[in-house]
Amino acid sequence: MRVFICLLLLLPVLTSHAGAKSTILIMGDSLSAGYGISKDKAWPALLQQRLDEKGYAWRVFNASISGDTTHGGLSRLPRTLEREQPDIVVIELGANDGLRGLRLQDTENNLDAMVAMSQDAGAKVLLLGIQLPVNYGSAYRKRFSSMYAHIANKRQAVLLPFFLEGIAETRAMMQPDGLHPTTAAQPTILDNVWEKLAPLLN
């Protein structure tokens, strides 16, 4: 009888623990916010579907905002970390900085601060790199791309050098503006991200 009572007392605790989900926070811009497409077809939504299908007890919280810069992401991050308490933070920012010709050192400092802040909060970090269009010049494009690797090496974060690999260079996978992927491109983006994200789920 005493054993039965003890089991009843433990049951709510065990049930609550079993239903708990870890959180993946995505801090991005229009490339992750689903610009120009249905939000439930964007790669973060597809990520949640894949996690559910594979039986992972993970929740995806997409805090991406179209047009956002690294400065905007950095300003939003502290409150978002406090509220969501993520186990993994995916940072996909910088494209708008580059397209607007903002000072690259400021962009790098902002990204570096976001990675450090996320790690200090106890989260693993996946940094998604991006490449600028060829008309921005080889020197600027090279320096822009290299800052992601520099931050990842400095902070020991996981890096996906170009998360639109196989997409940005394929016209059929891009919207007419040439900057945003189509609905059809979203599964490929997810596959690119999943390769680096999956090992972090353990």
Image (cartoon, grey):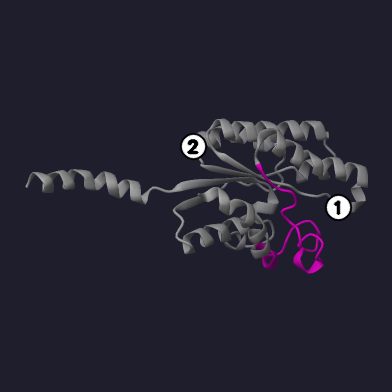
Residue positioned 48% across, 64% down in the render: 53
Q: Which residues are magenta?
A: 158-186
Amino acid type, residue under disc 1 in the picture: Pro
Which of the pair 135/51 is nearer the observer?
51
Crowd rating for badge 2 (residues with CA inside 10 Å; few <14, some 14–19, many 20+): few
- Residue 58 is situated, as x and y percent measured from the top left of the image, at 47, 52
Residue 61 visible somewhere in the drawing: no
Which residue matches tag 1?
133
Please state which amino acid type lies under the numbered disc 2. Answer: Arg
- Res 152 quadrant in image: top right
Question: Can residue 150 be found in the magenta stretch?
Answer: no
According to the picture, the residue beneath numbered tag 2 turns out to be 83
Helix, strand or loop under label 2: helix
**In x, y percent, where is residue 127?**
67, 44
**Secondary structure found at label 1:** loop
Mark 1 → mark 2, Cα distance in angstroms: 36 Å
Q: Left or right: where does residue 104 sit relative to residue 51?
A: right
- Which residue is located at x 83 percent, y 49 percent? 132
Nearer-the-camera pick, 67 or 95? 95
Q: Is residue 5 left or right of residue 97?
A: left
Q: Residues within 10 Å of mark 1 (few under 14, many from 20)?
A: some
